Image: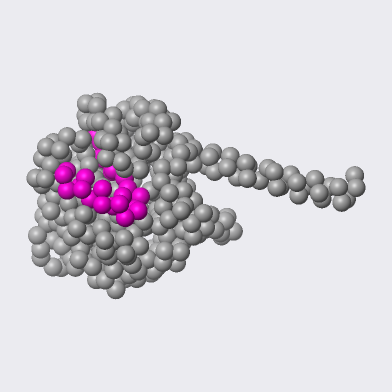
């Protein structure tokens, strides 16, 4: 075949097929990850498929894909996502809180990271490859300098997401927007205002949270509801009610986090190995995700299953406590080191080199799998890794030096 003709045909092929192929590739990629492929928001001109991922064709998305390439070159997993608890204080009293169990353990607090220390945590995490940063607590908006923490993130590398109970969101949204916050998940566990307020122990919290959502949408943030759902609330119809609420108030996404046997739920053995209701919830989400009139519905149990990324704690994801302790995730509180004492890349290497974290786990979160309950890499309470390599635990009674009142964070 004539070389010139071949080259012309090839160029014509690229010109006519590349756009469609790219669209097909993206649709399939998001379908695998999220269980849907619909755009839920345009933020700063970029399509958003989920608050939990960088906006498509944004600089953080470029960083994400570049990091995947270098993982192959290094033959070493590095984290895509970090959850950073910026405070151990909260004014709510949620029974499902995954953060502290100090009330039961009688523990005492150690100093929360200062602003410069928190900024170094973020800098080190981004140097390690993180492209998604979740800010949690406690209640992050009770930290006065929180906008400065958000501002210190290199926005060309990572997207930023706030998890909050929403009580202070309306008052602080202007500063958060100026600081460069991308997205916010507001915790709502019941669609009924009175029931939600009673559950979290704050009168009027539901109303203030909804006001915060409206203001966040008005300034252009991607907004979502984060709902901690239990087997009993699912059976009672809370899943459907919460999706309808999300549609009514105009959020872009509803995230369902299935209750974990950790924190104040660590004694709930019924949450271990109980997966039938989770499969029902995954199936129930499909109809809503197929309907563009509804927000995106992200079921955490789907994301941690074999169909998506699996349980990636310690493999692609880690958690930093308000005191600098590094754990595999928000829900499994084994401490592998403290960032005030050991460089993050060394802590990550120590954790990620263990057999339990060399690859993701299919099926469910490690902490919800009966076969993992006796492993020393899994714990529903803050505890140092047993081989002694993690150093001092600054988030549990054995490693505490300063007295203080138990924190009451909300998740």
Q: Eyeballing the image, is 210 above or below 245?
A: below
Residue occupying image coordinates x 47% and y 52%: 46
Residue 341 in which image quadrant: bottom left
Residue 379 in the image: x percent, y percent? 28, 48
- 224 with respect to 264 (left or right): right
Residue found at the very far bottom of the displayed protein: 116
Residue 62 versus residue 234: which sits nearer the camera?
A: 62
Residue 289 versus residue 28: which sits nearer the camera?
A: 289
Q: Eyeballing the image, is 311 above or below 83?
A: above
What quarter of the picture does the N terminus occupy?
A: top right
Residue 328 versus residue 33: which sits nearer the camera?
A: 33
Residue 73 in the image: x percent, y percent? 59, 59
Residue 191 in which image quadrant: top left
Residue occupying image coordinates x 10% and y 65%: 403
Residue 112 in the image: x percent, y percent? 21, 66
* The magenta stretch spans residue 229: yes
Q: What colouring does the structure picture have? A: one colour
Q: Which residues are magenta?
A: 206-230
Report whether residue 187 is seen: yes
Residue 259 versus residue 199: which sits nearer the camera?
A: 199
Residue found at the very far right of the displayed protein: 2
- 20 with respect to 244 (left or right): right
* The magenta stretch spans residue 212: yes
Residue 241 in which image quadrant: top left
Report whether residue 397 is seen: no
Residue occupying image coordinates x 33% and y 67%: 151
Total marks shown come to 0
Residue 228 in the image: x percent, y percent? 25, 40
Residue occupying image coordinates x 36% and y 56%: 182
């Amino acid at each position: 075949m004539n070389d010139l003709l071949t080259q012309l045909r090839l160029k014509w092929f690229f010109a006519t097929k590349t756009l469609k192929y790219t669209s097909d590739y993206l649709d399939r990629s998001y379908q695998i990850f999220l269980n849907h492929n619909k755009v839920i928001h345009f933020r700063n001109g970029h399509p958003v498929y989920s608050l939990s991922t960088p906006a498509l064709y944004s600089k953080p998305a470029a960083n994400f894909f570049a990091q995947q390439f270098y993982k192959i070159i290094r033959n070493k997993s590095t984290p895509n996502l970090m959850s950073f608890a910026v405070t151990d204080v909260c004014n709510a009293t949620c029974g499902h809180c995954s953060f502290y169990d100090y009330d039961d353990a009688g523990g005492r607090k150690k100093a929360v990271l200062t602003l410069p220390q928190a900024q170094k945590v973020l800098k080190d995490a981004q140097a390690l490859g993180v492209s998604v940063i979740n800010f949690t607590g406690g209640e992050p908006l009770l930290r006065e300098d929180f906008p400065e923490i958000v501002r210190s993130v290199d926005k060309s590398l990572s997207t930023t997401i706030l998890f909050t109970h929403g009580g202070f969101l309306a008052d602080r949204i202007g500063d958060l927007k100026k600081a460069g916050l991308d997205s916010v998940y507001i915790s709502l566990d019941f669609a009924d205002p009175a029931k939600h307020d009673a559950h979290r122990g704050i009168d009027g919290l539901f109303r203030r949270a909804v006001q915060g959502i409206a203001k966040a949408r008005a300034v252009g943030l991607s907004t979502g509801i984060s709902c901690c759902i239990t087997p009993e609330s699912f059976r009672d119809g809370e899943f459907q009610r919460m999706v309808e609420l999300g549609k009514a108030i105009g959020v872009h996404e509803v995230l369902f986090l299935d209750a974990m046997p950790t924190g104040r739920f660590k004694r709930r053995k019924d949450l271990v190995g109980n997966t039938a209701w989770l499969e029902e919830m995954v199936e129930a989400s499909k109809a809503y995700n197929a309907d563009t009139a509804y927000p995106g519905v992200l079921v955490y149990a789907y994301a941690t299953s074999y169909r998506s990324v699996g349980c990636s704690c310690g493999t692609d994801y880690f958690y930093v406590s308000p005191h600098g302790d590094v754990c595999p995730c928000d829900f499994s509180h084994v401490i592998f080191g403290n960032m005030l004492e050991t460089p993050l890349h060394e802590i990550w290497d120590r954790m990620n080199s263990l057999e339990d974290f060399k690859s993701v786990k299919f099926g469910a979160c490690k902490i919800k799998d009966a076969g993992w309950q006796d492993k020393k890499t899994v714990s529903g309470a803050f505890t140092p890794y047993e081989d002694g390599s993690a150093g001092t635990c600054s988030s549990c009674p054995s490693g505490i030096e300063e007295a203080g009142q138990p924190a009451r964070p909300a998740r």
